[in-house]
């Protein structure tokens, strides 16, 4: 086992070397003696957390359009569903529209208020199909296996519409998804757990071409009168009033080839997903100012980025205040520093003859091993392997 950001886990890699993850900040229930039975020779417990830290990320319009359409079936006017969102009806028809998560949250509150139906979250969740997610969904469809699709989905979770944050865990004889809802406002928390868990199950069923049975399902909220409707989704009898939201899948299901797997299509979708994430991450406000200060300004353009205290001083605020502003913006100094360091590292490894140790020093790392570990986390390859692959490409 390794300690990574305070989490006792091991660096996890999918069965394909293109995706690497590590345990970060979300808590995961644990028990001693769990050993991976997923068929890998390096049998260790594996934990894969999402590529985002909370639900407050920009998102597409498809989810809002879906809920507005559902409400319309029960006579709720579009204008009423968009109350308090700042969205125009025309935005619902713009496939390129990007909205703030709080706008979708306002639509959700309007839906819960206007449509009084039992199991509303389940009904809405069933309407999320793989095609609802656009290029993100097509990338999942073209993955080799369900396990790889899940791995991809977690890495690019900010291209989804979820408010719950799933953490995947391979443990003795089963695959477990811990579904975190702690940061969701209480008035819509149960609705969103029901919606998001149902949508996850629906999408995974779409991927394998048949209903996906769960082997376990637990929820934090008390047992509702419509528990039978939730059981229709989970197949297994769900348990309520539990310490955590979670569901478990037979890990054998995760290694089965997906019917529409295609490596070329997957690669094309991956590139488009990366571009989409980059566009959505175009920083504004305090984060943009921090990024600008982190980009080095030395004569050769490759001096070590500033520390957080120096950045705070340049912005005429305390370090504590800077951390608070970045948290409110949905990011952190460390996340921004990682983005800048990765971009600089890739440029230095590709465009200069600097050794790996020199690159590490110029990025502010005290030891080459720390830089190598970080670079592998960012890209899935060591700096040396990355350089060889880039230099071998035709020019």
Image: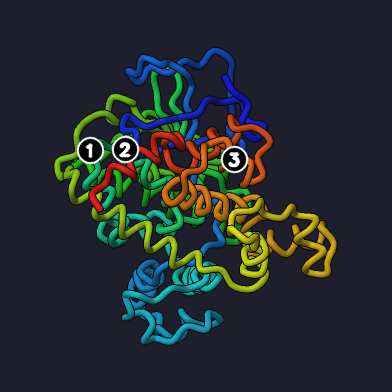
Is residue 223 toward the left or the right of residue 146 in the image? right
Q: Which circle, 3 or 2, is nearer the viewer?
A: 3
Image quarter of residue 94: bottom left
Distance from Cα at disc 1 to Cα at disc 3: 35 Å
Q: Quadrant of the N terminus?
A: top right
Residue at mark 1 = 144
Q: Position of residue 323 (x, y in %)?
A: 75, 57
Question: Within 10 angstroms of label 3, few (less than 14), some, or many (20 or more) residues?
Answer: many
Residue at mark 3 = 360
Q: Secondary structure at mark 1?
A: loop
Q: Which circle, 1 or 3, is nearer the viewer?
A: 3
Between residues 319 and 302, which one lies in front from this camera angle?
302
Question: Within 10 angstroms of label 2, few (less than 14), some, or many (20 or more) residues?
Answer: many
Between residues 48 and 34, which one lies in front from this camera angle?
48
Residue at mark 2 = 148
Residue plotted at (58% across, 33% down): 28
Is residue 222 visible to us here? yes
Image quarter of residue 75: bottom left
């Amino acid at each position: 086992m390794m300690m990574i950001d305070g989490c006792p886990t091991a660096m996890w890699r999918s069965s394909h070397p293109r995706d690497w993850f590590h345990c970060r900040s979300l808590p995961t229930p644990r028990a001693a003696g769990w050993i991976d039975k997923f068929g890998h020779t390096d049998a260790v417990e594996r934990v894969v957390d999402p590529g985002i830290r909370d639900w407050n990320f920009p998102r597409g319009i498809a989810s809002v359009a879906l809920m507005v359409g559902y409400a319309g079936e029960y006579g709720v006017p579009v204008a009423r569903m968009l109350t308090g969102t700042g969205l125009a009806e025309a935005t619902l028809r713009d496939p390129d529209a990007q909205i703030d998560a709080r706008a979708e949250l306002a639509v959700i509150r309007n839906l819960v208020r206007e449509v009084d139906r039992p199991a509303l979250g389940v009904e809405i969740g069933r309407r999320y199909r793989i095609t609802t997610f656009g290029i993100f969904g097509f990338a999942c469809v073209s993955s080799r296996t369900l396990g790889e699709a899940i791995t991809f989905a977690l890495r690019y979770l900010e291209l989804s519409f979820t408010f719950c944050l799933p953490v995947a865990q391979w443990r003795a004889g089963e695959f477990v998804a811990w579904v975190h809802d702690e940061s969701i406002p209480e008035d819509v928390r149960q609705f969103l757990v029901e919606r998001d868990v149902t949508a996850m199950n629906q999408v995974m069923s779409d991927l394998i071409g048949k209903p996906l049975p769960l082997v376990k399902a637990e929820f934090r909220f008390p047992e509702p009168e419509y528990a039978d409707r939730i059981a229709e989704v989970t197949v297994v009898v769900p348990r309520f009033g539990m310490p955590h939201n979670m569901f478990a899948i037979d890990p054998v299901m995760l290694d089965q080839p997906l019917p529409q797997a295609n490596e070329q299509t997957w690669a094309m979708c991956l590139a488009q997903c990366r571009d989409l994430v980059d566009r959505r991450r175009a920083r504004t406000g305090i984060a943009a100012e921090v990024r600008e200060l982190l980009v080095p300004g030395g004569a050769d353009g490759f001096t070590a980025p500033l520390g957080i205290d120096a950045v705070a001083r340049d912005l005429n605020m305390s370090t504590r205040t800077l951390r608070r502003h970045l948290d409110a913006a949905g990011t952190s100094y460390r996340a921004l520093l990682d983005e800048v360091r990765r971009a600089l590292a890739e440029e230095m490894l590709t465009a200069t003859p600097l050794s790996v140790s020199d690159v590490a020093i110029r990025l502010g790392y005290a030891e080459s091993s720390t830089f190598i570990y970080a670079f592998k986390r960012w890209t899935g390859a060591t700096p040396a392997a990355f350089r060889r692959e880039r230099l071998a490409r035709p020019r």
